[in-house]
Amino acid sequence: MKALFIGGTGTISTAIVQRLTEELGWEVWLLNRGLRKAEFKGDIHQIIADIHNEADAADQLAGMTFDVVCDFIAFKKEDVERDYRLFKGKTRQYIFTSSASAYHKPAASYVITEGTTLANPYWQYSRDKIACEKFLMEKYRTEGFPVTIVRPSHTYDKKHIPLGVHGKNGFWQVIRRMQEGKPVIIQGDGTSLWTLTYNSDFAIGYTGLMGNRHAIGEAFQITGDETLTWNQIYQTIADALHVELKAYHVSSEFLTAAGEKYGYDFEGSLTGDKAVSVVFDNSKLKRAVPDMCTKVRFDQGVRIALDYILAHPEECQVEDPEFDAWCDKIIDVLEHAKAEFA
């Protein structure tokens, strides 16, 4: 079986490529600009091209066909319109990576299925993904374009720690605050439910849909089965660091207002996603991919990640003094407000 990955070096796609080449024996091609390095043991074929330059990509792909084409970097409708033009008649399956943030926020039920309404008034990113899905499913219904849609939620790997509130440089400054005994901000009261998925577990579900005739014309959410509160998530991280968690709870509305002038989009990432309780019903995926299961619990995954991150400071430990000062300011303002009523 022959697969083309557009991108292929990200958190999710790297694990999928590794599984295909190291365990399942697929012939894998990557189409990207060659700017990001990935650690692959298998034989990978590289096409150096910018997918956003459609004419160049078409020249590079001339005469080639694939069993499956997987796009991980399509974010807007024009991206999937381009892919439709490039791969119509040249693949037996086109897999579009959407997002579980596309589900209605808040949904009528915190139990999410593929039938949950797609609507997110808080996050443009999610609305763009919905527009992509709509275009592709219309092409499937009217022309038989062989699309499969996957909706990941919060997927992480050995180089990332999943958090609710962080700055522009990612997770490290929050870890640093924990190590220094400083309070860390958790959205809301920390009791909303959330699902975290290690990327190797995600790869089991994704690869099981590749070449699967039951997946054509269908959408699947791919997540683990472990559900935690945000308080439990942060406590698990602190436990792995062997430090005391000093949680400081702040409403999502306040974080959105306080973060706007600093360029933090907490309305999208919190109100439109992480502040809302979600529990994913993966029954549909497991009917199509019986092997799908959670093999890496969060307490295990976070230890794998911290071991790697602490051992690779130049690669993973990106300081963010602006976010650190912002957290201190938020906490100071709220403590002063509390003192007014003491």
Image (cartoon, helix red, strand yellow):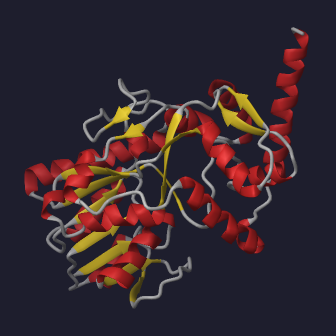
Image height of 63 relative to 184, above or below: below
Residue occupying the point 14% across, 54% down: 140
User: Foreground residue, 222 or 79?
Assistant: 222
Left or right of 131 on screen, residue 338: right
Residue occupying the point 58% across, 33% down: 267
**Residue 225 visible:** yes
User: Foreground residue, 57 or 147?
Assistant: 147
Residue occupying the point 36% across, 26% down: 109
Measured from the top left, where is residue 100 in percent x and y?
40, 44
Image height of 211 relative to 280, above or below: below
Left or right of 90 on screen, residue 117: right
Residue lying furthest top: 341
Residue occupying the point 42% across, 33% down: 120
**Residue 7 visible:** no
Left or right of 300 on screen, residue 288: left
User: Foreground residue, 9 or 73?
Assistant: 9
Quadrant for the C terminus in the image? top right
User: Foreground residue, 84 or 119?
Assistant: 119
**Residue 192 position by quadrant:** top right
